[in-house]
Image (tube, rainbow, N blue to C red):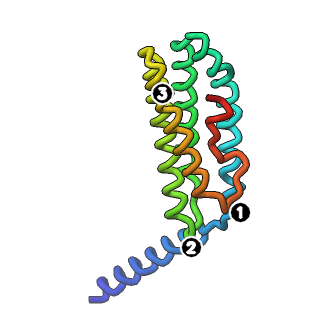
């Protein structure tokens, strides 16, 4: 019997210590913004390089090059999203931020789809994907208006 009480006491202590870091990990919206903005800023700089001249490439018929650019941007955004998933979210906004990150995932998928369509010479299909991408980006950005992000707003109209 004394062994069971000792074991129960040790388990209770372990559970208590496991709960303490969870409480300490709570972040405020300002702290969250401070952690994610540098990640998004790096993605923006990468997109500026990757997507430079993509519109002109499509207009002049260089669809293969434009396709590689869009697929490269999708890869960079996918990497950014995985980094954003690692940042602890404020408990009060967890559902909203989860939905925001799901929207970012959709943006990755739409960039990939547009890139594949251009690779197959389907300019009209790629245009449809870009329109959906812009619409999704607006909805996704609206989810996090209260954070007043500067770099974490995805604005495909700047590039595409």
User: Nearer the observer, disc 3 or disc 2?
Assistant: 3
Toward the viewer: 58 or 18?
58
Badge 1: few (under 14), some or many (20 or more) residues near its Cα, within 10 Å? few
Which element is circle 1 on?
helix
Q: Residue 51, position in %: x, y? A: 64, 25
Which element is circle 2 on?
helix
Determine the CA span between mark 3 and mark 2.
43 Å
Mark found first going from the N terminus, 3 or 2: 2
Which residue lies at the image location 50% right of the left edge and 27% below the top edge? 127
Mark found first going from the N terminus, 2 or 1: 2
Which residue lies at the image location 52% right of the left edge and 50% below the top edge? 101
User: Which residue is denoted by mark 1 in the rendering?
Assistant: 30
Q: Residue 27, position in %: x, y? A: 63, 66
Look at the picture and state if 12 lies above or below 65: below
Q: Quadrant of residue 97?
A: bottom right
Q: Are circles 2 and 1 on residues that touch, CB within 8 Å? A: no
Toward the viewer: 28 or 57?
57
Q: For this view, does 109 lie left or right of residue 79?
A: left
User: Which residue is denoted by mark 2 in the rendering?
Assistant: 23
User: Which residue is denoted by mark 3 in the rendering?
Assistant: 114
């Amino acid at each position: 019997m004394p062994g069971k009480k000792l074991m129960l006491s040790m388990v209770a202590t372990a559970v208590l210590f496991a709960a303490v870091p969870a409480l300490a990990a709570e972040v405020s919206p300002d702290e969250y913004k401070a952690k994610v903005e540098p990640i998004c800023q790096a993605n923006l700089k990468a997109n500026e390089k990757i997507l430079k001249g993509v519109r002109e490439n499509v207009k002049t018929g260089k669809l293969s090059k434009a396709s590689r650019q869009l697929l490269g941007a999708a890869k960079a955004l996918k990497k950014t999203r995985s980094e954003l998933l690692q940042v602890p979210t404020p408990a009060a906004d967890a559902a909203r931020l989860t939905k925001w990150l799901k929207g970012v995932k959709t943006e990755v998928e739409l960039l990939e789809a547009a890139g594949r369509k251009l690779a197959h010479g389907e300019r009209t299909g790629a245009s449809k994907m870009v329109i959906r991408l812009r619409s999704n980006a607006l909805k996704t950005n609206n989810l996090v208006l209260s954070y007043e992000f500067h770099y974490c707003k995805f604005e495909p109209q700047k590039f595409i």
